[in-house]
Amino acid sequence: MSKKNTSLRNDLQYKRDRQRVKRKKAFGIVKVSVATLIAAFFAILFLTPIILTITNSFMASSEISSNYGSVFATNANGGKVYISEKVTLKFIPDIVSFSQYITVLFKSPEYLLKFWNSVILVGPIVFFQLAVACLASYGFTRYRGKLRSMIFFSYVILMLMPYQVTLVPNYLVSDKLQILDTNWAIWLPGIFSPFAVYLLTKFMRRIPDGVMEAAMIDGANEWQIFRKICLPLCKGAICSATILVFIDYWNMVEQPLILLSDPEKHPLSVFLSKINAGEIGLAFAVATIYMVPSLLIFLYGEEYLVDGITYQGGVKG
C-alpha cells in the first residue's frame, strides 16, 4: 500500500508541476504579447508624424491646401483663426507629385543654402568635440587627484544645465571676443560642450587597469596606449557620442537665433520654423530632406549606439 500511495503522490505531484509549468508558459506568452502590443502602439504613435511628413511631401500644392489650409489660415491681422471644420490627416496622396522636391532642389536655392549652412555649422562641432572629448576623457581616466575630480564635477554640473541657462554667458563671451554673427560663435561653445567628455570618461573608466599596465610593461608610451588600446575599445562609445551630438546640434534653434543676426547664415532648422502658410507643401519636402542625414546616421550606427551605452568594458576575445 505504501508503494502505491507513494507512486500516486508522485503522479499527483508530477501533474501539479506540469500544470504549474504550463501556467507559467501561458502567463509568459500573455505577458510578451501584451508588451509587444504596447510597444507596437507607441512605435506607431511616434512614427505617425514622420510617415505623414514623408507621404505629404509627394502631394501637390492644391491637395495640401485643401487638406490643411484651414490649419495655417490667418486673419487680417496675421493672427491664427479658429478652426471650425474637422481636419482629416491624409497619408496617401491622390496623385503622386514631385513638384515640391523640384522646387526645393532646383527652383529655390535658398533651401539648399540653408541645408549646407547646417552642415557647415554641425560638421566641425561633431568632429572637434569628439577629438577634444577623447583626449580629455583619457586624461580624466589616467590621472587621479582632487583637481581632476573638481574639474570633472564642474563638467557634470555644466552638462546638467539646459543650454538656455548658459546662452547669456555665451553671448557675452562671444561679444567680448568679437565673434558674434560668425560661425565661431556657434562652433566654440559646441566644441567644448561637456556631454561627450562625460560619456567617454565614464566608458574609459570601465577599461581594466591591467590592460594599460600590461601595455606599459611592453614599452608603450601614453600616446600609444591612448591610440592603440583606449580608442579601439571605446569605438562603441565614440559612435554613440557622435550620433547623439550630431542629432542634438542638427536640430539646434536657439543658438543661431541669438548668436547669428544675419538670416543668411541661419541653418535649415531655423528656416523651417519661418515657412509661411503659402509654402506648406515645401515645408513637408524640406522637412523630409532635413530628416535624411539623421536617419542615415542613426540606422548606420544603431548597434554602436546600443553597444556604447550598455558595454561594461574589458577586452573581447
Image (cartoon, rainbow, N blue to C red):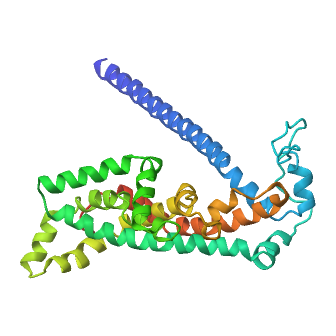
Q: Position of residue 292 (x, y in %)?
A: 63, 68
Q: Is 266 placed left or right of 244 in the picture?
A: right
Q: Is 14 placed left or right of 317 in the picture?
A: right
Q: Position of residue 33 (x, y in %)?
A: 59, 40
Q: Measuring 38% from the left and 23% from the top, which residue is drawn there?
A: 8
Q: Position of residue 26 (x, y in %)?
A: 53, 35
Residue 317 visible (yes or no) = no
Q: Measuring 88% from the left and 50% from the top, which residue is drawn there?
A: 69
Q: Check the image and name the residue furthest to the left.
A: 217
Q: How many marks?
A: 0
Nearer to me, 250 or 186: 186
Nearer to me, 248 or 308: 248
Nearer to me, 54 or 66: 66
Q: Measuring 36% from the left and 22% from the top, which residue is drawn there?
A: 9
Q: Quadrant of residue 214?
A: bottom left
| Vertical order, 66 against 266 (above or below) | above
Q: Position of residue 207 (x, y in %)?
A: 22, 63
Nearer to me, 249 or 234: 249
The quadrant of the picture occupied by the C terminus is bottom left
Q: Measuring 9% from the left and 82% from the top, which residue is drawn there?
A: 219
Q: Is 176 placed left or right of 87 in the picture?
A: left
Q: Is 160 placed left or right of 211 in the picture?
A: right
The quadrant of the picture occupied by the N terminus is top left
Residue 151 visible (yes or no) = yes
Q: Quadrant of residue 187?
A: bottom left
| Vertical order, 163 against 234 (above or below) | above
Q: Quadrant of residue 21?
A: top left
